[in-house]
Amino acid sequence: MKNNKPVSVAIDGPGGAGKSTIARILAKRLGYIYVDTGALYRAVGYAALTAGLDPRNAEAVCALLPSLCVELTYLEGEQRVLVNKEDVSDRIRTPEVSMAASAVSAIPEVRRFLFALQQDMAVRHSVIMDGRDIGTVVLPQAQVKIFLTASAEERARRRYEELIGKGMSVTFDEVLRDMEERDKNDSERATAPLKAADDAVLVRTDGDTLEESVERIYRIVEEALA
Ligand code: DC
């Protein structure tokens, strides 16, 4: 790190592309903080569901925001997300919360609500931040931008194995259908849709092992910061 100025590495891409796993490993290797911004949208989706709201109802979700406190904290190096001081990190990983997160993320006020929190992390620390609009909207000045993707089938297979590994009862077809629906929501929304920044390096992870993807991206970061 030159001049002690914090470094920002932005990793965007659709769900299941491997962003969070790869970013977490790279952050440890580089000594940066890993910021999983999807967890913030999940936290808002979770809060909407807990309040008995339809997460697609923008008016109702916006009415919730003034009394909602979403925070990031780190426990033994792992990001935890708090909603009104309660740690919801594990509860926001269900398929229901995934769909709710995608729905609330299309609401411009929700994106504004979470914007400062994300930028603030990058001002104070060197970060690897993953999401959908990090290179385009949140950290357009990031020194390294990567757009990570893979086919929908490959991403659904990884997500299916992850959910089964956590003991959830889902079928591959359900996971694939949810994945395709979320891709569509996330790419077609009017505000900050999922898309690669013009200056992002495109990385497809189909057929790569995790180690191969990590190495490829580590080399891209190293070259960009050299
Ligand atoms: O990365 P994830 O699957 O945990 O994200 C959950 C949802 O949040 C995803 O469907 C889209 C939304 N999201 C977003 O709109 N912008 C981000 N920077 C991160 C996530």
Image (spheres, grey):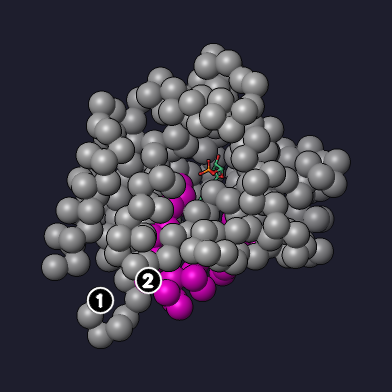
Left/right of residue 111 with respect to residue 128 in the rendered view: right
Provide the residue designation for mark 2: 126
Magenta region, residue range: 111-133
Residue 163 placement (x, y as % from top left): 56, 29
Q: Quadrant of residue 225?
A: bottom left
> Any magenta on residue 117?
yes
> How far apart in space, not on screen, are marks 2 and 1 (Cα)?
9 Å
Q: Quadrant of residue 113?
A: bottom right
Of the pair 28 and 35, the residue shown nearer to us: 28
Of the pair 65 and 15, the residue shown nearer to us: 15
**Up-down: is 66 above or below 145?**
below
Residue 219 placement (x, y as % from top left): 17, 53
Residues under numbered marks 2 and 1 in contact, where contact means CB atoms less than 8 Å apart: yes
Q: Residue at x 30, y 83 (%)?
A: 4
Instruction: Identify the amino acid type marked 1.
Output: Met
Label 2, secondary structure: give it.
loop
Provide the residue designation for mark 1: 1
